[in-house]
Amino acid sequence: MSIDEKIRRAEVRRQKFMKLAAIERGISRLSKKMVVVDGPTRKAADVILHAVAREYGLRPGLIMTKCREPWIAVPRMLCTALLRDFWPGTTWKQTANAFGALDHSSAFHARARVQDLIDTEPVFKARVDRIKEELMNIFKDVR
């Protein structure tokens, strides 16, 4: 193996290491911003996530992605708004973190957007009503 080949391979290894280091730094920064959502709040968020996923015909994991396509983002926003409705002791930060957002302003925006859609789109309102009815039956024993 020539010296040039050894240098090239060493450079490739260095670049991989630098990418991994950057990822680790990013994870560290994100973990400092996140509020841990566990216990009853996590269970409530999961129940809501699955109810919304069933109504929309999506996998729960797909709703939790960072995708901004409306057919994924709107169900995720609905999950956020419903968590605030059905689990009122949850903070805005916990509500946002439960569905993958980092900032409480995401939860504010989601709730406002969902209310706007309910007020302007009858099909969306009917969908929300079906989900709320299902969740009321689930949560009636919890409260």
Image: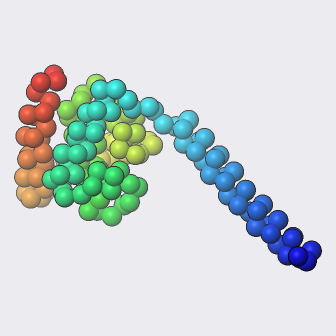
Query: Is the N terminus in the top left, top right, bottom left or bottom right quadrant?
Result: bottom right
Residue furthest to the front in view is: 1
Q: In this image, 27 relative to 88: left or right?
A: right
Query: Is the C terminus in the top left, top right, bottom left or bottom right quadrant?
Result: top left
Q: In this image, 21 relative to 6: left or right?
A: left
Residue visible at 35% across and 44% down?
Answer: 99
Count the numbered circles shown: 0
Return the x and y of residue 71 as percentages of the image width and height.
26, 62
Asked if residue 53 shows in the view, the reply is yes
Residue visible at 70% across and 61% down?
Answer: 16
Return the x and y of residue 88 as percentages of the image width and height.
24, 28
Asked if residue 92 shows in the view, the reply is no
Residue visible at 22% across and 51% down?
Answer: 53
Q: In which quadrant of the rendered view does residue 2 lie?
A: bottom right
Question: Front-most of 95 and 57?
Answer: 57
Residue furthest to the top in view is: 143
Return the x and y of residue 11 as percentages of the image width and height.
80, 66
